[in-house]
Every structure is written in structure tokens, then in C-alpha cells.
Amino acid sequence: MSNGIVSVTIDIEDWYHIPSVSGSSFSKYKDTEDFFSKWDGRFDYLTEPTMHILDMLDELSIQATFFIVAEIVNRYPGLVKAIDAKGHEIACHGYDHRCYIDNKTRMPLHTKKFFLNQMKLAKELLKMETSQSIRGFRAPAGYVAGWMLDVIESLGFTYDSSVSSNSLYNKTDSHLRKVKRTPYYPRKGELEQGPPRRLIELPFPYLKLGPIRIPSAGGPFLRFFGSRFILAGINQTLREGPALLYFHPLDISSARFPQSFSKQRPFYWSIKGEVIEKRIRWILTKLDSKFVTMRDLERYSKRRLSTEKLPLT
Ligand SMILES: [Zn+2]
């Protein structure tokens, strides 16, 4: 019997989308529009490793979910269609990857209306390019607030996958004290556990070492802590429910990215390239799990929660 259900998720963004380069209160460029008005060098470091990941997923027979920064549809013609053509799920990772809450205060950086309009546009762009219904959202850089989930739910999104409850950091506007590492319904207006609603949260796994909870979904932690650590966190999470793994095409790229970023924040790609691809492959072969898209994980989780006794909140 396989060891639970795991979704492989890939965030499709380029080097200039990260918060130290654009779209945050500490970025070098205000947003990607500002970046493109000033940048005249090579910008596409994304297409090549994305195509490589598509081959890898084919080889491993895995159907994954791609959280895509929607403006990529226009800036990288054909890339989103290539992902869609392989049968993977297309989900939304914002319009231009800008952050909507401040990294320190967690107060909104933009109005609710602006966020709604951007998400509406993002969803339409992705839907038109792929003819898939777009159900999933992941907040750019993981900065998420309860009000953001209410907005995306009103636009027809049925799951979010941004919450990481752990002992090292909290990028949300909630304390997340009762939030676990398996799917749950967030209370309206916040991210704490609440009664069932249309939108479900599919959070990131963590590794519990005594009282410490260390994020272990992949991404930067796959680069810093290595594959055994990530595998242990996913396996521990699987004892409680479904889990997910995430990474970026940039993580496996061996190209040297331009060094154009805010001095207030380090550029965090010190370990990347082939070594990270090896780690991802190792984890995927070691996990004795059934791999499903997030759309299927959403359905499975909603069914599972409807048969469980709901927590008193
Ligand atoms: Zn991202």
C-alpha cells in the first residue's frame, strides 16, 4: 500500500519576480512593469528549466500542479500552453508576483479592490490560455492574509496553498497557533481553523523536532537543509493527512542570474542547479506515495474532512 497522497507543485516565476527585485516594500524595482521599463538585458531564465521539469515529470509519470504568475502568459509566449499540453494542472501565483501585505507589519500594501482586479485578470489570462478552470491560488512569496482568501473565494477559487505554520517565521496576518500541516478550512477574514466553506487551505508540511516545527515543503529549504530533511518532514506529515512538495524551475537552473536586487535582502540562490534536481528526484523516488494534482488533493481533502468530526472552534 502506498504511503498517502502527495502533490508535486511548481511555482512558475522568473528571477526578477522575487521580492528583493520587484513587487515588495524592499524591492529594487516597484513592480515588473517598472523592471521592464528599465531592464534591457536578458530576462528569461525560466523557459529552459521549466521545459526540463516537464521532461522529468514525464519520465517519472507524475501529473503536477503549476502555480503560474499570470503575466508570464504574455511575456513568455507558448510556455503556459506547453505546461497545459502535458496535462498538468494550471493554478494561479498572482498576476505579477507582487506582495499584497507588508513583510514586517502584515498590513495591506494594496487595496482589496486592487487585489480583486489583479486576481480577476490573472484568472482570466490563465483560463484563456489553457481552457482549464482555475481553482487554485498560491500567494506570491507566501505572504497571505485572511482577507485575501475571502477575495479569491469570491472569484471562484476553491483552494489556497500558501499557509506555512512553523517555528521559524510567519508570513501571514494570523497567529496560526491552531493551524496544522494538513488541509483545513480557514475561518472567514482570517487564516485560523474554522467551519467548512467553499475554499479550503492546502498548507505546507513541516518537520516536528520536539517542540520545533521546521518548514519542509521544499523551495529554499530544499536548498538549505537538503533532501533527507524534506523527505522526513513530508513522511511525518503523511501520518496526519496528505502532503505537498514545492520547488521552482529556477532552483534547478545552472545559469548565473543577473545580480540586480535590493541591498536590504540577500539574493538567496547560493545553492541551485543540478544538485537540487538530484535532490528532487531522490525525494520523488523515495516517497512511496500516490502523486495527484492539487485539484485532486482538494477533492480528497474535502471528502475526508466531511466525514471527520469537525473541531469545536
Ligand atoms: Zn513565488
Image: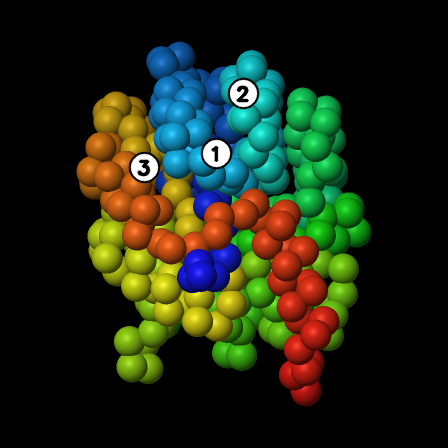
Which kind of residue does numbered mark 1 sit on?
Ile
Name the residue at 44% across, 29% down.
Answer: 58
From the image, tell me which residue sits under label 2. Answer: 82
Callout 3: SS = helix
**Residue closer to the observer: 110 or 16:** 16
Q: How far apart are marks 3 and 1 (CA)?
A: 11 Å
Callout 2: SS = helix
| Numbered circle sitting on residue 251 | 3
For the N terminus, the image quarter is bottom left
| Numbered circle sitting on residue 12 | 1
Q: Residue 303: horizontal and vertical position, in percent?
A: 69, 64
- Packing grade of label 2 (10 A; few <14, some 14-19, many >=20) is some
Mark nearer the viewer, 3 or 2: 2
Which kind of residue does numbered mark 2 sit on?
Ala
Asked whether mark 3 lies closer than 8 Å to ligand 1, one says: no
- As displayed, is residue 257 above or below residue 215? above
- As displayed, is residue 188 above or below residue 18? below
Name the residue at 51% across, 40% down.
Answer: 64
Name the residue at 40% across, 25% down.
Answer: 55
Residues at circles 3 and 1 in contact by the CB criterion of under 8 Å: no
Asked whether mark 1 lies closer than 8 Å to ligand 1, one says: no
Mark 3 and mark 2 lie on one chain; the one further toward the N terminus is 2
Mark nearer the viewer, 1 or 2: 2
